[in-house]
Amino acid sequence: MSEVADGDMSIGNYQTREKYIQQVSYSLERLNPGLQVPPISNWSYLTQVHGIQILEVTGDDIVQGEDGDALVTTLENSVLTVRVADCVPISLISEGGAIAIIHAGWRGLLKGVLEETSNKLMATKPGKQMAVIGSHIGPCCYEFGREELDQFIQKFGISVEASTKINSSSLNLSAVVERICDEKGIEIIRKDSSCTSCLADTKYWSFRFNSTELRQCLFAWIEKK
Ligand SMILES: [Zn+2]
């Protein structure tokens, strides 16, 4: 997952984004000797709309800004990306030989974007699934309206309600994601619990903190099967 120091990964300015993807690629290769990061032409990205549309990257065509909130592929060296600034970025890995990436905000989670993507991945390549969960806004900073919070409690149980630093009701996005993974039999192999709002403008960007238009990016690809 990229951080503030890696630059803005929003898709508004393609040239800037490409420049920063190049920078991220260089630092990944420097930190991981022998790693070959696929070229920018292999990086798929979505116009994220807080829905449950899942697109599959097949053949030589990457996804270039089509509407959707999840990507799936069985191809090697095809980079899937989602950009976030508080929402939960998730990558699913199937032992069958496929991966997915998901932009999971509260609207998408309520609509079932994680469950639907897991189902799609299972249909594409059956096998045990694992999840990597990137940084997102914590319950410490995610004050949430009563009506929407009750919808979450009804669907996912009381453990998803929490309190902010100033003692107002908040939504625990991690608890929602963990609950879904548990129900779907998905093993969480890595989770970054740092809060994007607590670390706003230093390590991550946070829309809730200052309505920024800048975004970090979670990216995943299959190196070799
Ligand atoms: Zn926080």
Image (cartoon, rainbow, N blue to C red):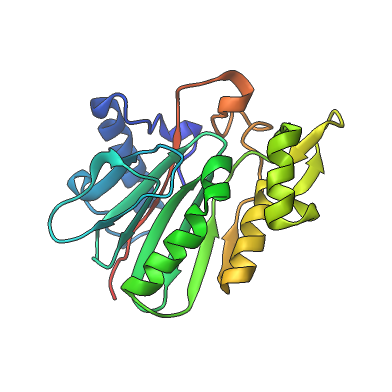
Observer-nearest of 208 and 110: 110
Where is residue 16 shown, x and y percent of the image?
Answer: 29, 26
On the image, which quarter does residue 195 sit in?
A: top right
Q: Residue furthest right?
A: 167
Residue drawn where x is 26% and y is 47% of the image: 43
Q: Is residue 147 above or below residue 177?
A: above
Residue drawn where x is 24% and y is 57% of the image: 57
On the image, which quarter does residue 206 sit in?
A: top right
On the image, which quarter does residue 98 sit in?
A: bottom left
Q: Is residue 211 above or below residue 106?
A: above
Residue drawn where x is 23% and y is 65% of the image: 75
Q: Is residue 67 visible?
A: yes
> Left or right of 213: which side holds 135?
right
Total marks drawn? 0
> Left or right of 146: which side holds 210?
left
Where is residue 130 shown, x and y percent of the image?
Answer: 51, 69
Q: Is residue 201 visible?
A: no
Q: Residue furthest left?
A: 60
In the picture, the quarter occupied by the C terminus is bottom left
Q: Is residue 187 above or below residue 64?
A: below
Observer-nearest of 218 and 27: 218
Residue drawn where x is 69% and y is 32% of the image: 198
